[in-house]
Amino acid sequence: MKFRLEWLGQYLPGDLPDLATLRRRLTDVGFIVEGTEGEGKDAVLEVELTANRPDGMNHRGLAREAACALGRPFRDVPVPAPAEGAAAVSSLATVTIAAPELCSRYSARVVEGIRVREASARVQVRLRALGMNPISAPVDATNHVLWDLGQPLHAFDLETLAKGPDGLPAIVVRLARAGETLVTLDGVERTLTPEDLVIADAERPVALAGVMGGLETAITPSTTRVLLESAHFNATAVRKTARRHGMHTDASHRFERGTDPETTVEALDRVTELLLADCGGTVARGVIDALGTPRPRQTVTLRHARLVSFLGMEVPLPRCAEILSSLAFGVREAAPGVLEVSVPTWRVDVEQECDLIEEVIRVVGYSSLPETLPHAYNPTWSEPTLAREERARDLFAAAGFAEACTYSFVSAEENSPFASCVDGTPPVVSNALGEPFTTMRSTPVVGLLRAARHNVRRGLGDLALFEVGRSYALVEGRPVESRRAAILLRGRRGVHWAAEARPADFYDGSGAVAALFAGFGAPAPAFRPAALPFLAPGRSAEVVADGKVAGWVGVLAGPLGATWDLGEAVVADVELAAIPVPSPPSSVEMPSRFPGSGVDLTVTHPIALSWDTLVAAVRTGAPAELLSVEAKYLWRGAGVPEGHVKTTLTVAFGSAERSLERDEINRWRDEAARRLLAVPGAAVDGIS
Amino acid sequence: MSSTRPEAGGAAPVSVEEARGLLDAELAAAAGRGGLLPGDVHELKVRWLGKKQGVVTTLLARLKEVPKEEKAAFGAGVNALKQEVEARLDVLEAEASARAAALAEAAKAVDVTLPPRVPPVGRLHPLTVVRRRIEHVFRGLGYEVADGPEIETDWYNFESLNFAPDHPARDSVDTFFIEGGGTGRDALLLRTHTSPVQMRTMEGRRPPIRVLCPGRVYRKDDIDPRHSPVFHQMEGLVVDEGITFAHLRGTLSAFAKSFFGGRAEVRLAPTFFPFVEPGVDCAVSCVFCETGCRICSYSGWIEIMGAGMVHPNVLANAGIDPERYTGFAFGMGIDRIAMLLHGIPALRLLFENDVRFLDRTWS
Ligand SMILES: [Zn+2]
């Protein structure tokens, strides 16, 4: 927002303040001067104002802050009431507030016999300095007062207002009726709703209250009789109306944030003065000053002891009183160390003691606050879910995966194949930016697919990505967020000139999941064949831990791989909370010093007979000395019947107490072989 | 391979001296032909020390032809010769096997400049790295790390945090709402800041509270170099008896010095957030320049976070007596700090997951 130094100076008696000093001090007290243009009285300041300080969005208001910040006096510019004509305003127009909660005050004057001319050079210079083009004296006068006092004004051509039963042009502040329309000054026809606060005449809306006037009742070059409006509208009503119609004006900007109901008549007098000077005419006698429901005045108590303990620094009581007084607060010492402070009507932001403390310290200066630390403190608690997420990140990074960070929302189409990943339904953003940002993902894998496609399209096809993040669902209307570890593998693994690289396959995915479990010290998960719509049939599995499904892993279904331009990709998603993390050990046995011993068994069996079945056969009834069963080699093809596979298992035995005898190992091996042989369809080499 | 066989037609030596001369000549010849290998030495051993045809054996067989009085001397001479041959050939044998080992190693030599077989090197995302660095500083100051949902209610995201019912930020213009949520304070939305965790933390626990909450937040911003509808914040909250505005300043200063380096200063400026009063913008003196640079817009200061004293209405909404307890809160954008620290030119790089970007080192 722009401010002209000469204009500010009107409220600061004496020499114009030094521009650099003013800039620094205004910024210190919360009115950030982002830049300045020009010098001397023509200098213009660009100021960023926070939404809670509409009172600073005009020259008088900012000058008041400047005076306080600079420690100089502030001087208001009194406006004498204009010389009035004989005709009483009450005989020329009527004002009715039919929505008193939304309009606390509507003040109006009537000026007759004007001739629309250009505004005076002084007004034009000022408006140009703020970046506005002068239009005509009546319009420029209202703009001038808005930027001077912060009161938005509107001028109606009195002749265009429909008359009421009493024969007088009528102003009615009311809610619009369904279906009513209004062509606003910008030429747009607006269809109104019963929530829109409007200014109407006896027949129809003539302005969107606090936002923009209507075209039909606007001042034209031939206008001679003017009704000037200076009102206070409810901030929420104006904001909602402006939003509903997609409008933003200098007037709505101020009404939305809160204007001063006490300034309506003063502003009216000032605009009348400007209008008379530039366009001549006669002011009707008196002001129409209709009142709605008034806003209560605020009185706030400030305890000096509280101020000191809150700030952690001493500011003497007289200094506090001086600062508040210079900002036009009414200050009275109600009891020793207790100030009774009445809040100026334009300060819509001050309601409580802490607001007054801020007033004091922002003027004293934040740079004078000491830098102290709270007393030492031992954390007593930590969030276990976050610790688990962090550990999963470290484990995947250590396993050679790159961490991705993808959007939580994806397109409905992208998510739909994965919707079964969560219970309930995917949350949908009702006011999304459009696709692909409408649907909260059912698995982070959807984001990884997008990330993978980005890379593949740039020729970066060998990918190992992970994301530790959330999946989202609505279950019976309640949001459920699950913390997941997801991976995507694609392209070649182990690329090196010395050997041919192999493509990522299912076992890279299940291996990464197993590594995650191992990293947490959890028992190895089981992989159970599962039909999942987004995974290739026969190359998809549920991850099972503690008998419960903890996630899934598999090769992306062919059609999805094609849709995403990925071809074959391996994906997995594990719920972190489902990993059965054991307590850390409180004691550890010595590892056996006796080397174990491994023996091989080769089984020919139907392909459909799973590895898990073979392992179960070996383990069932095995001695405690059985350490492990590993898959050594699988062979399909020559020498193996069609539909069969030859699997070599390495079975390891060992004991913590002794070296094992060759005889007993052979006996255990033979027993295991006979158990394998008992599995239907299995044949064991060397045993019949 | 060199040959140690005697010249065809060469006569067997008849005296120790002759044999020694022959030995010298043969070994010199072998040496002249290049390094001996174990096989060559073996052949020499057979030729000189062989039980049947060896030169020494053959020479010794001449003992019966030697006159009786010379027998003792001849026998001693041949024995001395034998020991000498053995000793010299042992030396050659050791040299040969060392030479053979060296040749075997040489055969295994590789071009060490060829590309190595690098095990896969994983990476943490820069947002993770920067977040952890921030957490590290505050953990040192006694903060715990808390967490909360991203799909929030209007109550936690706005109303309990003292946003007026008609505050502009509550508008759907800035906030994403979820279909099928309730209405009013039960409306479901994507949290626009991590501040709801303040309220959830204060509800769940009594002071003293000293927590940090990192997380994803959402705002209805179109994607451009500085905006993204998803980004990350780090919220801090301290509530206790006797917490002052000076503590806030001291804490932010301690963070700035620890995170950006010892010469970093903080500057607080008044601003407005509904859930704190006073509210401040915190800038840190630019650590990238002495006299102004692009990063600090030639001002010497970089805005890094918003902060303030917890509004008494917020404490009261959490059931904490604002007369007895005071507190401060601060919040910073992790994405923004990551961009600042690493000169990342566009926010979208953080979400695009281009592996050439992800493969960099961030700390
Ligand atoms: Zn700089």
Image (cartoon, grey):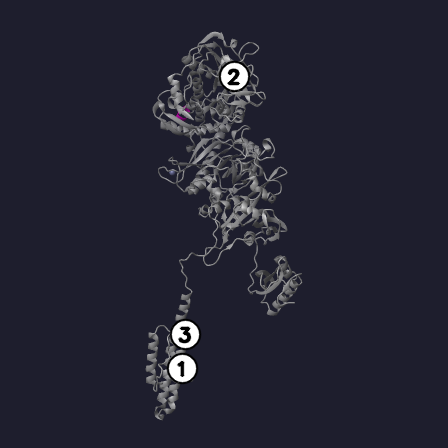
Q: Residue at x 42, y 43 (%)?
A: B342
Q: Ligand 1 is found in which quarter of the picture? A: top left
Sequence-first tag of 1 and 3: 3
Q: Is A352 placed left or right of A4 in the picture?
A: right
Q: Nearest to the eye among marks 2 and 1: give it.
A: 1
Disc 3: CA contacts within 10 A as few (<14), some (14-19) or many (>=20): some
- Residue under label 3: B38
For label 3, the SS is helix
Residue closest to the far bottom = B68
- Please state which of residues A654 and A345 is positioned toward the viewer in this rendering: A654
Mark 3: amino acid: Pro
Q: Is B291 placed left or right of A282 in the picture?
A: left
- Please state which of residues B312 and A542 is positioned toward the viewer in this rendering: A542
Mark linked to residue A106: 2
- Please state which of residues A265 and B203 is positioned toward the viewer in this rendering: A265
User: Residue A450 appears at what percent x and percent y?
Assistant: 52, 44
Q: Which residues are magenta?
A: A67-72
Same chain under badges 2 and 1? The reply is no
- Residue under label 1: B49
Mark 2: amino acid: Tyr
Chain of the residue under label 2: A
